[in-house]
Image (cartoon, rainbow, N blue to C red):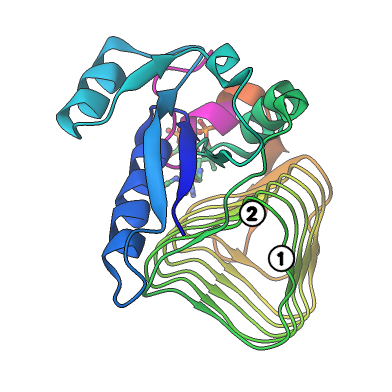
Amino acid sequence: MTTDVVIVGAGGMGREMYGVIRLLNAVPPAGPRWRVLGFVDDYPTESNVALVARLGVPFLGPTRWLAGQPTTTQVALGVGQPRLRRETDQAIVGYGLPAAVLVHPAAEIGPDCVFQEGLFAAGGARVTTNVILGRHVHLNQNCTIGHDVTLGDYVSVNPLAAVSGYCRLADEVLVGTTAAVLPQLTVGGAAIVGAGACVTKDVPAGVVVTGVPARPMGQSATDARHRGSPAGRGPAR
Ligand SMILES: CC(C)(COP(=O)(O)OP(=O)(O)OC[C@H]1O[C@@H](n2cnc3c(N)ncnc32)[C@H](O)[C@@H]1OP(=O)(O)O)[C@@H](O)C(=O)NCCC(=O)NCCS
């Protein structure tokens, strides 16, 4: 069965999702699973629209294009930055379209893991066992999620980051590329673990930590989140 899907976000994250969908369609023996209708974006940059065109996929316009789509059409929320992902989800949820679950053929989701709509797992992402993943969790290339971990809604784990066993990351946490979170730690909502950091203690909500061992850098600001966005949507807005 082929399911129609619209990618929300013409930036790097959305285009990476398109790449995963293409691979999923190529995996035998199932045949094409997804038909990509195109991309929508309320704030597209010219360069992103051009890059979408290079993929040979239509740019459909703003997210209101989703209005009137049958509820069999799914959305792939290709927004890398956690807060912006939540806001975009809230803006489009009224259209009543389910969020696609996209797991790269070379990603692994282990036994007894629970996930919600919108899970995106890029190539090489590994989720071990007894893991709980919230809505629109993004697991980027080659990250690892240890046993008994809970990730809240809109959490992003960037490439090569490692979240160790029994950790709890609240909603909208961003774990930067190559960072490590040691076992049994809690990271509060919307906190940011900077790229390359090693978290050895609990991180309060909204705090940015960097370094080895990780220390607070300051309160997370929207600006910092945008600049830290994994393959974001272009300039901050
Ligand atoms: C920590 C982070 C959120 C800070 O973002 P920011 O507030 O925009 O910070 P800036 O780039 O303005 O840098 C401010 C200072 O912090 C330092 N810094 C930035 N990120 C750092 C990091 N991860 N570790 C150590 N120091 C860091 C900068 O060198 C700079 O130092 P200076 O003032 O001595 O020149 C961001 O750099 C980061 O690591 N984001 C993770 C996102 C990620 O993984 N991106 C890759 C996606 S694939």
Q: Secondary structure at mark 2?
A: loop
> In the rendered image of this protein, does residue 142 appear above or below residue 25?
below
Residue 104 visible = yes
Over which residues does the magenta segment extend? 224-237
For the residue pair 234 and 71, the one nearer the viewer reads as 71
In the rendering, at what x and y percent does residue 48 appear? 30, 22
Label 1 belongs to which residue?
A: 115
The label nearer to you, 2 versus 1, is: 1
Residue at 71% across, 65% down: 115
Q: How far apart in space, not on screen, are marks 2 and 1 (Cα)?
A: 8 Å
Instruction: Report the predominant secondary structure element of the magenta stretch.
Output: loop
> Which residue is at the far left?
54
Q: On the image, which quarter does residue 77 sit in?
A: top right
Q: Secondary structure at mark 1?
A: loop
Residue 164 within the segment the image draws in magenta: no
For the residue pair 228 and 17, the one nearer the viewer reads as 17
For the residue pair 126 and 24, the one nearer the viewer reads as 24
Q: Within 10 angstroms of label 1, few (less than 14), some, or many (20 or more) residues?
A: some
Label 2 belongs to which residue?
A: 137
Answer with mark 2 or mark 1, whichever residue precedes in sequence.
1
